[in-house]
Amino acid sequence: MNRSPEAGPPAAPAARQPGAKTASSSRRYVSLRWIMAGATCALMTALMMALGFLAERNLRRVMTAETEARLSLQAQNLALAGSSALLSDFPELTLNPMAKTMIERQPEIAFVTVVSPDGRIVGDAELQRIGQRFVAPAALEPEGRSHPGSRARLLANRTLIVASAPVQVVNGRSLGTAYVGYRRGHIDEQVDHMRRTGLLWLAAFLLVGGLATYVMMWRFLRPIQAVRAGIERIGRGDFHQPVLLDDPTEFGMLADALNTMSWELTVARDNLVETERLSHEMELAQSIQQSLLPSARLRSGAFTFDGAQRAATEVGGDYFDSFELPDGRIAVAIADVAGKGLGGCMVTSMVSALLKAYSVIHSSPSDLLGALDHCLAGLLPRATFVTMFYAVVDPGSGEMVYASAGHNPSMLYRRRDGSVLRLNNHGAPLCLVRGDRVRRTLSDSSIRLEPGDVLLQTTDGVNEAFDPLGAEQFGFDRVEEVLQRAAPEGADAVLTALRKALDDWRQSEPFTDDETVLIIARDPAPVDEVRSDGEAPAALVAEALASGHALRLRAELDALDGLEPWLHGLPEVSEFDERSFRALHLALYELCANIVEHGYRNQSAEDFMVWWIASRRHFLIIDCGTPFVPAPWLPADYANPEIRRRGRGHGLDIVHRLASVKFYPATPEGNITLLTPREHAARTPEEVAQ
């Protein structure tokens, strides 16, 4: 019976260094034959010893009981014989031969003696003891055993067992006592003899059992040599030669398992080589794709061009880019290829190369997209298409000309009123249909990006992100909410807020599609009221240093608790009534909280200064955080439920309602905020907060 499995792919043995020692050659082993033979002998020895101990104890108990019974009987017989002898004039003539005969026949008997009632020996095996007073052996104690029908009494010490029986006549008159003493050592001698015999038999059994066990183990373990040779071949990397073992025991099963393992290792090794090759190619593709993306944000004039990408697999089908054109304008593009993996990466590589080439030739975004469609249609298989948004921005005028080939609508945040516009498009995706029909759907659109505006463009991996239950998508409305909330703080804030919103939406679920974001942000323009009064920021700082009362605060919200006691310590402010003081404290707290959260982003290692200039009766705040220039203030309509539900973003509205505030961002002295309290506020802080 051949137990080798089906032959797998051949594999060459691994090379070994000359003279190298394997673990099996350098380590000493003990044969299982000797281990099993020794274990069997040890087990048999322990078992035989236990049985011998029990047998010896039972034998000693039986021999002792039998000896006591026989001794009692002999003592009674002696007493019976001595009753007639003691009635004669010379009892020793009868008792002496009887005692000698008992001792000669039973050498284990120590003494045979008949004693008169007055304690003198009247019968004994030795004539010279006749007439002497009988002295019983020392330390005799009752043996405590009784034999039915026996009148004998048993006494014993460590060396003797003594049986005594009364010598009586028919009328019951006592004539004396008969004693028979037995040596205990005789029992020990018999037990020792039997023990020596048992040990000889035990040694014979152990020898025979050990040899039999060794022979059986040698027979049973003989297949292990073939198994060991097969394992060593596998260890050397030789998976081709199977283990040929015809054995009905577990060794045969082990040989089958080794053959199966050899074939599986061969397959796994081939798969590993292929996996490593694919992994290397994937890393190369990922490196190529990363090289297609901008390595850093692009700044041109007042514009910032930024973006980010998270691929659902090692490489994805999304792409974005921003680069400067020869005429000084900035070209931006974002694309989504139908497909992921290496195929999507190859298409994005072609799109990137063609985009850079055609951007120099075509000044019109729609013409460029049309040229891309015409070129890609001859390269891509059917059912492969690309959605793409392409725009050209003039940093001087802020004019943006764009066209879209089936891509997501762009979202434009307008700083002047805080609204968000959706720039929809009607173009078809590139290569969706052939024959230049896509070109006829494309058209250019134009819009001006004003100071503080932020344009956001995404791929469908953002708006189509599902919640953990897979029931609802993130949607464009939520993207718009994130943009409206974060855009006043710039491009970085939009990227961070959108990523956090997506992570919170998915929770722990992995994203299933590439997420790519493109942002065009224009810096805010200085607010008109900043310098309308002709104040010079340097002069304000100089006056504060000369005559102001200063408070240094760390850039953390807990540090703002020091504002109230500091205000109480200012003589001019302490004269305010309770309502005006609370309004001033609330306005100053809101301004400082904005600096901590948005200017310094809660970096407690930083600090800023608050000054009270009594001569001008205003506060001056100087910080070196991120500049923040708000849009011209328009009172919020709190009758609108949407405004009330917003929850955040009411700080500056509260400040404007409670005090007069002016901003001087990014001056050589830092960001300067000028706050003038209204000693009699139009509304209480509680009313404003409501």
Image: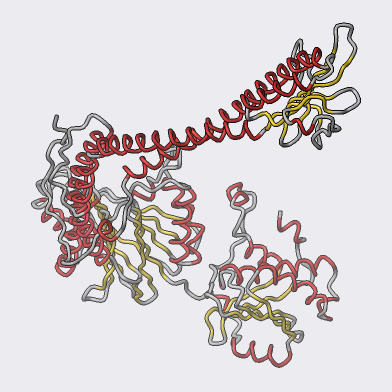
User: How far across and down, in percent of the image, does residue 377 sit?
Assistant: 11, 50
Q: Which x, y percent locates residue 290?
A: 27, 64
Q: Is residue 430 visible?
A: no
Q: How many marks?
A: 0
Relative to the observer, which residue lies in front, 601 or 445? 601
Residue 221 x, y percent position in the rendering:
26, 39
Q: Quadrant of residue 191?
A: top right
- The image quadrant where one finds the N terminus is top left
Q: Is residue 94 left or right of residue 494?
A: right
Q: Quadrant of residue 163?
A: top right
Residue 603 falls in image quadrant: bottom right
**Position of residue 22 measured from the top left corner of the image (x, y, whole percent):** 24, 60
Q: Looking at the image, is 447 positioned above or below residue 571?
A: above
Q: How is the image coloured?
A: secondary structure
| Image-based side of 341 in relation to 435, left or right | right
Q: Is residue 503 visible?
A: yes
